[in-house]
Image: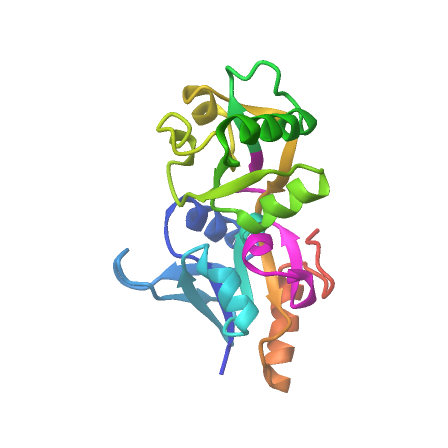
Amino acid sequence: MAIKLGVPSKGRLQDLTFDWFRTRGVELKRSGSDREYAGAVQGVDGVELVLLSAGEIPRELAAGRIHLGVTGTDLVREKIPLWADILTELAPLGFGHADLVIAVPKTWIDVDMLDDLDAACAQFRARHGFRLRIATKYHNLVREFLRSNGVADYQFVDSQGATEGTVKNLTAEAIADITSTGDTLNANHLKPLADGLIHASQAALFLSETAQKSAIETETLSGFLRGLNIPAGGSAA
């Protein structure tokens, strides 16, 4: 058996992950073509590379099927309730930065803060007879954020892509989505609320506390993390 390291299977996130490990003396390699989801860890014995989508990695970590995984902090918090009980965030990786924000139409000139949104929700329901719709795929994070800030009388519209377009298409009145530059929000005539930052996300290396390890695998894991200059409790230097 080996320590299993899950990393994103494609795209810029994979490239940056490979670069991060390379600068620390660990070479990650794909096997075969870009369509083949297999790879290897060179220069380290007893560590196996597993290529997965960034969205799958939190699930595999929680289930204990991989020992280590690189994914967004937003995905871990959204997909795993009480995630800190079963995962350890070992190190932020310094890339993949994006903010999960609440955004509303720019034409809503009187809605700039969460309190304004709460008032707009109440007015919307009184006027239309149904709750104001917020399009998002981050139901858990957004629900907890709005609850803790006293926003009520809304409903979610599930959106797994092109969330910014839902307002223009009249399937939602507001959105909660990831943004890195704000350009897409601006292009769709949306503005983030001044106090509507839900989570500042980035890629991070996580350790599964549920994955089973033999004594040899435990030693392999400890040596691997030492080589990356990551103490057992997390936070790379």
Q: Is 80 one of the magenta-colored residues?
A: yes
Question: Which residue is pictured at 52% across the width and 47% down the height?
Answer: 138
Can residue 67 be seen in the rendering of this structure? no
In which quarter of the view is residue 53 placed?
bottom left
Residue 235 visible, this angle: yes
Q: Residue at x 63, y 41 (%)?
A: 199
Which residue lies most toward the bottom here? 215
In-image side of 169 versus 194 (left or right): left
Q: In terms of depth relative to the viewer, which is nearer, 156 or 34?
A: 156
The part of the image, by quadrant, that contains residue 223 is bottom right
| Residue 77 pos. (x, y %) | 60, 53
Residue 220 drawn above or below residue 224: below
In the image, which residues are magenta?
Answer: 76-101
Compared across the picture, whether 163 is left or right of 174 comes to: left
Above/below status of 227 relative to 204: below
Residue 194 pos. (x, y %): 65, 24
Residue at position x 62%, y 59% in the image: 228
Q: Residue at x 56, y 38 (%)?
A: 154
Closer to us: 131 or 37: 131
Task: Locate residue 188, reporting x and y percent.
Answer: 41, 22
Q: x, y (%) of residue 10?
A: 37, 52
Residue 226 magenta-highlighted: no
Q: Nearer the viewer, residue 95 or 24?
A: 95
Foreground residue among 55 and 14: 55
